[in-house]
Amino acid sequence: MLIAALDTATLTLSAALLEVGEAGVSVMAERTEHQPPRSVAGAPVGHGARLPAVIGDLLLACDTRLPQLDGFAIGLGPGSFTGLRIGLATFKGFAYANRRPIAGVSSLASMALAAAAAAPPGALLVPLLDARKGEVYAGFYRVEGGGVAAIRADAVLPASSLLALVQELPGGASAAGFGEGYEAYAEVLSPALARLPTPIRVPNAAAIGRLCAPALRDACFDVARLAALEPHYVRKSEAEVKFPEGLPPRP
C-alpha cells in the first residue's frame, strides 16, 4: 500500500510517500521545507501556503494521484498549535474525501526513530523541540527491537527542570538529547545531558510513516476514528490559561 506521511509541528514542513509491503516500509519520495517565521517581500508563508504544492510534487515524483493513496500518516505534535492544526486538518480532509484510513503518532517519537541508528540498543533518547518561554517539548524513548518505545509520556517543562527528570528514569544517567530544543538550551543541558551525534533536529515524515504503518496496514476507513484524531498539544493554549472556566459572559 502507498501512504502519505506529514509533519507540521515546527517551522519545518516534512512530507513523504512510502510503500508499505510484506518486506517492510520503503520511502518512495520525500520533501522537507523550512518555512520563514514571517512574510518576505509579501510572499505567502506558512504550511498552509506551501502544503498543497509539496504534496503535489511528491505525487508527481511517484507518478500517482491523491485518490490512489491507500492511507495517511500524520505527526500529532507537540509543537506549533497552528502548524499542527493545518497539517491534521489537511490530512483528515484527504482521508475523509477519499475514504482512506488515517493514523497519527507523536512527532517526538518520529525524531527518536529517525535518530535511533546513531545510538546503541537500549539507549535512552531524549528528542527536544523548542517550546519557547524557556521550555522544551521533550520525549523519552528507548531504542529496542529495531525501533523505539516510549518510557514516559511526552512533556513540556522548563529546560532547567529536564535534567532532574531524566536522571530519575531508568538509564537516565547515560541518556542522550538532540533536536532544535537541545540546541536552543545547550548551555543549560550540555553539562549533564550528552548530545546524540545525529543530524536530526525536527520531526521526520518518513519516520512518521514507519511508525503509523502497522496501524494502517490492512486498515479500513473509519469515520469515528478519523473524527477522534486530535493534535497532541501537551501545553495548554493561551486562552485555556487565561480563561480556565471559559470566556466570561458578555455584559
Image: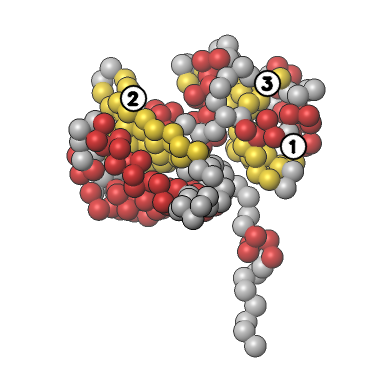
- The C terminus, quarter of image: bottom right
Q: Of the residues shown, which amino acid type is indicated by label 3?
A: Arg
Q: Which colour scheme is used?
A: secondary structure
Q: Of the residues shown, which amino acid type is indicated by label 2?
A: Val
Whole-percent x and y of residue 144? 52, 17
Q: Of the residues shown, which amino acid type is indicated by label 1?
A: Ala
Q: In which quarter of the image is residue 16?
A: top left
Q: How far apart are marks 3 and 1 (CA)?
A: 14 Å
Whole-percent x and y of residue 205? 42, 33
- Horizontally, residue 43 falls left or right of residue 165, namely left
Instruction: Residue under label 2, please give it.
Output: 27
Q: How far apart are marks 2 and 3 (CA)?
A: 27 Å
Instruction: Residue under label 1, please give it.
Output: 159
Q: How crowded is mark 1: few (under 14 residues within 10 Å), some or many (20 or more)?
A: many
Q: In this view, does 247 lie above or below 185?
A: below
Whole-percent x and y of residue 113? 50, 24
Instruction: Residue under label 3, please give it.
Output: 195
Q: Quadrant of residue 197?
A: top right
